[in-house]
């Protein structure tokens, strides 16, 4: 820590959307000092030369080549990198007492055969998997407090899990027939130049993708299985919509018993009553992504359309905040025994 008690922070991969979002959030964090930020392609540049919105917050912070010796002197290192980077550097950092929060998928899937199948590479640090804690605070808060390695959840998995949790907790739905119909803004594809992410390709258009097996599917299934304490059969269909930020997940389940919409509302409100970043909205509400833009909040509503046997939950999050960097800072706060909401209380942006 610094002399004034701030956490010394390293960020590996500081030019992508999640890395820059970490910088934006940590600029408002009273206990955070970003000591190291890395980028192989932008080494030597000041952060503000690429991101002028951060000029006042980081006037002297420069990008540097990844250097394990420098990162070892941090209290915590965030990996805002492509898949496959964190697992190569994490062992040496953990051995030297540095805590790790990985925003990629290197540590999210327990079955490494499944991980290697979906990500197309051998896992470089299988010996660390027993130490990994999945960083969804609403379910794993106490384990996160003592963790050394956090697998920060994916954006789709965060929305889907939070929406299904009250239903699975109370065994209200048939676990053999769950459906998650989810939509994401284009920033979910990352900052790299891709034809499919160009404005001319995404504007005034709307499509499903990854239907035969999106990379987030095994993560979602693993966590829903854990919630339900049995095997869950999930159909997950992601979509790309022409907006920059935001995820909306509409979730469907077949009820296993008769229950009124009022009772469903009560169960959801009770489940999340003490959660600082989950807002169960009043009955009949229609959450939209504008309600969470730039914030760490998940807003949701639950319905039983026409009083039939299908329950519908709709969840909205900002994919770059609660779906990535905000949740990562929430996990950091827990790991270092800070107020969980520190640096994360800014309301959503409107319009």
Image: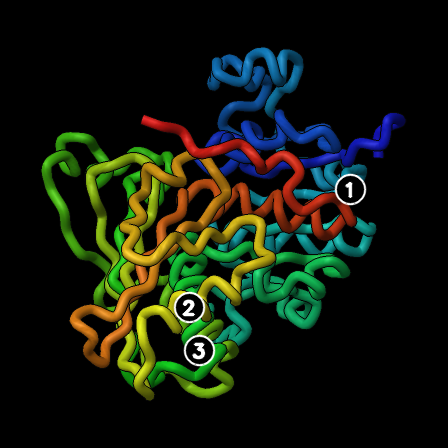
Q: Position of residue 70 (x, y in %)?
A: 75, 34
Q: Nearer the viewer, mark 2 or mark 3?
A: 3
Disc 1 from disc 2: Cα separation: 30 Å
Front-most of residues 306 and 66: 306
Sequence-first tag of 2 and 3 = 3
Residue at position x 28%, y 40% in the image: 186
For disc 1, the marked residue is 75
Q: Which image quadrant: the C terminus?
A: top left
Measured from the top left, where is residue 191 in percent x and y? 37, 34
- Residue 97: x and y in percent read 82, 51
Residue at the spot of label 2: 220
Relative depth, front residue between 216 and 265: 265
Circle 3: element type: helix
Q: Is residue 5 in view from this perspective? A: yes
Q: Residue at x 39, y 66 (%)?
A: 265
Circle 3 residue: 168
Q: Where is residue 200 drawn, in percent x and y?
A: 13, 31
Name which quarter of the figure residue 288 lies in: top left
Q: Upstream in the sequence, badge 3 or badge 1?
A: 1
When the figure is inspected, residue 91 is found, relative to residue 22, above or below; the finding is below
Colouring of the image = rainbow
Residue drawn where x is 36% and y is 69% of the image: 262
Q: Which mark is residue 191?
A: none
**Vertical arrangement, residue 232 with respect to residue 43, above or below:** below
User: What element does badge 1 sit on?
Assistant: loop
């Amino acid at each position: 820590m610094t002399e004034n008690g701030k956490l010394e922070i390293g960020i590996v991969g500081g030019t992508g959307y999640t890395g820059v979002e970490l910088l934006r959030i940590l600029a408002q964090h009273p206990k955070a000092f970003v000591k190291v930020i890395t980028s192989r392609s932008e080494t030597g540049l000041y952060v503000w030369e690429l991101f002028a919105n951060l000029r006042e917050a980081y006037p002297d912070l420069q990008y540097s080549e990844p250097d394990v010796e420098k990162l070892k002197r941090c209290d915590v290192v965030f990996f805002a990198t492509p898949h496959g980077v964190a697992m190569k550097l994490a062992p040496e950092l953990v051995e030297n007492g540095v805590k790790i929060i990985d925003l990629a998928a290197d540590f999210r899937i327990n079955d490494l055969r499944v991980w290697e199948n979906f990500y197309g590479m051998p896992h470089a640090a299988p010996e660390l998997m027993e130490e990994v804690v999945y960083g969804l605070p609403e379910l794993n808060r106490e384990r996160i407090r003592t963790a050394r390695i956090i697998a920060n959840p994916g954006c789709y998995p965060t929305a889907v899990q939070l929406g299904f949790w009250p239903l699975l907790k109370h065994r209200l739905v048939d676990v053999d027939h769950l459906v998650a119909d989810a939509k994401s803004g284009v920033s979910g594809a990352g900052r790299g130049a891709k034809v499919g992410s160009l404005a001319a390709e995404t504007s005034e258009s709307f499509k499903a993708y990854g239907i035969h097996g999106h990379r987030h599917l095994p993560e979602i299934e693993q966590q829903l299985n854990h919630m339900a304490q049995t095997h869950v059969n999930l159909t997950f269909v992601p979509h790309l919509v022409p907006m920059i930020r935001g995820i909306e997940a509409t979730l469907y389940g077949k009820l296993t018993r008769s229950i009124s919409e009022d009772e469903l509302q009560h169960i959801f409100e009770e489940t999340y009553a003490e959660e600082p970043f989950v807002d169960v909205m009043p009955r009949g509400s229609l959450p939209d992504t504008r309600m969470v833009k730039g914030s760490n909040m998940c807003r949701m509503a639950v319905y039983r359309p026409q009083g039939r046997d299908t329950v519908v939950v709709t969840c909205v999050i900002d994919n770059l905040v609660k779906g990535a960097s905000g949740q990562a800072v929430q996990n950091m706060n827990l790991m270092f025994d800070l107020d969980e909401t520190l640096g994360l209380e800014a309301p959503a942006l409107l319009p």
